[in-house]
Amino acid sequence: MLHEVWSFVDAERRAGRPVVLARLVGRDGPGARPLGATMAVAAGGAWRGSLSGGCVEGIVLDAAAAVLDGAPPRLELVSPGEHLMPWEDAPACAGQLRVLVTPVPPATVCTAITAALARDEPLAVRVALHPPYLWSTAATIDELDGTGAFVEQLPQRQRLILVGATDLAATLAELAGPLRRRVIIIDPRPGHLGSGAFPAGAETVPAWPDDWMVRHPLRASDAVVVLSHDPRIDDRGIRAALSGGAGHIAALGSRATHRQRLRRLDGLPGLERLVAPAGLDLGGSSPADTALSILAGIVATGNGRSGGLLRDTDAPIRAVPAPNVLKPAWRALPVHPSAGTSPRETDAVC
């Protein structure tokens, strides 16, 4: 996905180094990464991202290097097993990948992408899948024609609302960055908010949590975690969160603490939605362990999963992407002659 590599792309462009994008726009058979997966390769050899989890990246790097050296942009067919000897087993994800290898978009499109990600604003990005591979943008994916093109809606960050400015809140905020969560830390105690422990990207709000939630209605994509260990703060946060529409509401504390909490909140509508003790059963004890457990629970809830071991379930490893995120239209398009004939593309995953 473009947003996964865009900070690298932006930094390289600002440094004056050309960058080529390799994007997965179609696939015949299973694969480790979804359609839209992107690699960004800069002049000098630095790169970020992946298209398959590791088995075709070397091939893609060679194709990107050729475009950096002046070769025309192109659609390539790449197979994870194409360098194997006849007697070697092919990898499980051995389907052919259709990869679009082009320079980064024109400056106007790059600026629009950078601004949208920085401001957390909606933006859809379209690139044609035929020469000269023109780019365009619009506010939403429905405003762009997907015919003969690949269209991606840049995702807005989901909110992670932390009630209580604690050391665990600081660790949660740090780990939530790669998950593209917009972290908001709410605490009525100025001394706690002024600790200096929180990363620059986290928003700190001096307020009671229920007052803030009244002014900022909760959405289904929001996750709320109360962790001040002060019932005067936590209970107000829980009451407000349960009356709103947050998709995940959790509370820190031992089982004994939670039993006391349940007695205080007895009869509160929606109390069965409260996840407490917060997090998955990882058994860790450090702030990082606890933060990982809590964030894993949030991710599992968002994907409709229980958070158990993958070996104990037959469900697909990865949740199905939302249908309004991508608009691929790659069928019946010309492929560079060296890539072979066009396969039947699917979005299966292994």
Image (cartoon, rainbow, N blue to C red):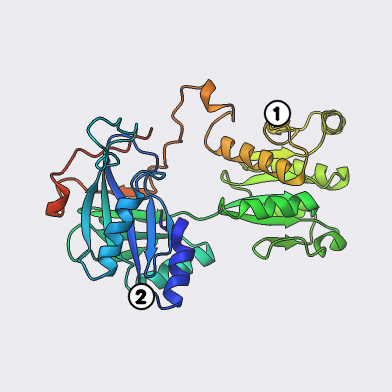
Count of marks, rendered view: 2
Residue corresponding to mark 2: 107
Residue corresponding to mark 1: 272
- Residue at screen point 30% across, 51% down: 59
| Of callouts 1 and 2, the N-terminal one | 2
- Residue at screen point 50% across, 55% down: 156
What percent of the width, then of the height, locates residue 161? Answer: 68, 51
Q: Quadrant of residue 346?
A: top left
**Foreground residue among 32 and 62:** 62
Q: CB under 8 Å between callouts 1 and 2? A: no
Question: Can residue 216 be seen from the camera position used here?
Answer: no
Q: Quadrant of residue 316?
A: top left
What percent of the width, then of the height, locates residue 80? Answer: 30, 41
- The residue tagged with tag 2: helix, strand or loop? helix
What percent of the width, then of the height, locates residue 6? Answer: 45, 63
- Residue at screen point 72% across, 36% down: 278
